[in-house]
Amino acid sequence: AQSVAQPEDQVNVAEGNPLTVKCTYSVSGNPYLFWYVQYPNRGLQFLLKYITGDNLVKGSYGFEAEFNKSQTSFHLKKPSALVSDSALYFCAVSTGSARQLTFGSGTQLTVLP
Amino acid sequence: EAGVTQFPSHSVIEKGQTVTLRCDPISGHDNLYWYRRVMGKEIKFLLHFVKESKQDESGMPNNRFLAERTGGTYSTLKVQPAELEDSGVYFCASSQDSWSGETQYFGPGTRLLVL
């Protein structure tokens, strides 16, 4: 069975500071990893994904994530946070035989002005 | 290009009643998924359609839930009769291909409250 852990329910960061939202996963086989963001009263919006190749993946709005196979992690990062980045972030995984996404419980990011 | 749309955006019903949720995927997307987030927990998979066929319905919680996708276009998810624990946000997603690395595009969700 596959699973995703987002160890922090809440992350607070000051505007302009770097941010990290953590994600670890467990799968059998090679993982496909995704980050989605949910703004208030909106649906899930795709940010980025890792399939294969370069471990550093760049996505929308200046976000990036680093795939670390040995640590089974896929942390989301941004060099300089904006107040508008405040939202709920979900990490998800799928693998070869399972088309569906398995999500973490979500991390609420608050960027303080 | 229009994204995934869902109707209604909110629904409040009493226990024992029936509710039908609708999802319109992105045009041309053969794959349609239903997920739900209950009580602020993880978003959990319910089922996956490829065109009009159910590819995987392993996440459906019980036989009170019925999903259909007649004609391979829009899909409906009916809950009958609704129970208190069915409250949550129901998301629909679609994708063009069905391999595991394909990006799924999500709708805004339907917020269901069962009283």
Image (spheres, helix red, strand yellow):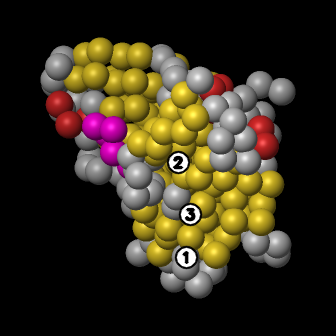
Figure quadrant of the N terminus of chain A: bottom left
Q: Which residue is mark 1?
A: A72
Report the predominant secondary structure element of the magenta stretch. loop
Q: CA distance from mark 2 to mark 1?
A: 16 Å
Report which quarter residue A86 is drawn in.
top right
Nearer-the-camera pick, A101 or A74: A74
Please name the amino acid that badge 3 sits on: Val
Please name the amino acid that badge 2 sits on: Phe
Sequence order check, earlier mark of 2 and 1: 1
- Tally of numbered discs: 3
Read off the chain for label 1: A
Please name the amino acid that badge 1 sits on: Thr
Read off the chain for label 3: A
Q: CA distance from mark 3 to mark 2?
A: 10 Å
Q: CA distance from mark 3 to mark 1?
A: 11 Å
Question: What element does badge 2 sit on?
Answer: strand
Q: Position of residue A101 (x, y in %)?
A: 54, 57
Above or below residue B85? Residue A6 is below
Above or below residue B22? Residue B106 is below
Q: Which residue is mark 2?
A: A90
Sequence order check, earlier mark of 3 and 1: 1
Figure quadrant of the C terminus of chain A: top right
Which residue is pictured at 69% across the width and 65% down the height?
A66
Which residue is pictured at 40% across the width and 58% down the height?
A7
Is residue A64 rendered magenta in the image? no
> Which disc, if any, is residue A93?
3
Report which quarter residue B41 is drawn in.
top left
Read off the chain for label 2: A
Magenta region, residue range = B38-43
Are both tags, 3 and 1, on one chain?
A: yes
